[in-house]
Image: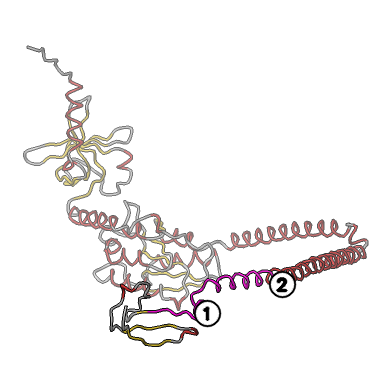
Amino acid sequence: MAEIRPLSVSEVNRSIKSILLERKELKDIWIKGEISNYSPSGAGHIYFSLKDPTSVIRCTFFSFQNKNYKGKKLQDGMEVQVFGSINLYEPGGYYSVNVARVEELGKGDILYRIEKLKAELNAKGIFNIERKRPIPRFPKTLGIATSPNGAAVEDIIRIAKERYPNINILIAPCQVQGETAPSSIVSAIEELNNPKWEVDVIIAGRGGGSFEDLMPFNEEAVVMAYYNSRVPIISAVGHQIDSLLCDHAADAYVPTPTAGAELAVPEIEELENYLSDIENRFNQSLKYKLDIARDRLHLISNKHIFLEPRMLLTDRIQRVDEILNRIFLLGKNNISTKKNLLQRFENITIHAKSVLSTKDKQFRLALGRVDSFSPLETLTRGYSVARNKKKEVIISPAQVKVGEELELILKDQKKIKVEVKEK
């Protein structure tokens, strides 16, 4: 029987940790309970437990996560819900929750809905970085979609005018909180997108507020209005905790309306420096091109051809003469060649007549010989050719019968009919 090797404590804890980390149902979950054993560390980490009437689970809220927590100070006895994933601390041999977010009870359902909508919109590509457009560097008209009575619009106008006094500002007033806020924000953004207003960049948002006050900017309709904006749009909703869905859909986002104005509108000094830089670069470029042109002109003007321009004409005349001479010689040679060919054709005619005469004599001689052997020639000497009705030539008495009618062919193809009386 093989001996079973015992596992070390570390091996067991490592195996359990790997199992916990692989379970999807233990990742990104919400857990609610009462805080107990609250213990902040000197490094900024927070350790506490969550308990209900029958169970307790340890929680670790690391400093890089809890630095964004702006809610009520955590303490024992507080009813909260935490968002995070289950992990196992190998040296201690206990599992705990690595907390990413802590919320007081009452917000959990809303946060869950926001996270769900965020995942759906992200899957559709609404938050893709590749589709985001750069903010125009020097806009002529700034559009603002916000409440006309809040401090946000005043801050944006003040900062914009301080930075660039000649900027055109177009305000599309809207409700930024309450049940009618989503549709009002959408209408304002759509109006600023109307081409007749010639808006170059839009700032849409509001000043700070509570969790509930900022909820309109997490509504799908508002997020899609940011996404569908034809004009580059900046999300400027005053908040410090996490981020709103409209921030992800906008071309850029800032934590405050003031920062939005600073991003959208350049400083007049910056513009003047930019124009001055453009002017200097233009002058340098123009000077460089003039120097090059001057050097080229100097180089060309010192060439011998420009010092003696007649040489350009004499060279052309000489070249024309050479071409004419070549044309004359080519024409002369061509005429001579054609003349020789013509003479050869005349000789061919004489030779052809001689050959034809000889062939004619030979033909006539051959014709006379043929005629001497022709049956027709024999007929001229008093002979005839006998044929029966089948046009068969009679060469033997055995071919005919007494009383049979025959045909005699005489000279000049004349014919007579005869009857055999006796053979």
How far is mark 2 from mark 1, CA to CA?
A: 38 Å
- Name the residue: 36% across, 58% down: 238
Residue type highlighted by circle 2: Lys
Left or right of 334 in this view: 82: left
Left or right of 55 in this view: 60: right
Note whether 15 is above or below 154 in the view shown: above
Q: Secondary structure at mark 2?
A: helix
Main SS of residues in magenta: helix
- Name the residue: 48% across, 62% down: 264
Dot in front, 2 or 1: 1
Residue type highlighted by circle 1: Arg
| Residue toward you, 167 or 306 | 306
- Rendered-image quadrant of the N terminus: top left
Marker disc for residue 240 = none
Left or right of 356 in this view: 229: left
Return the residue at label 1.
Answer: 381
Magenta stretch: give its range: 358-386
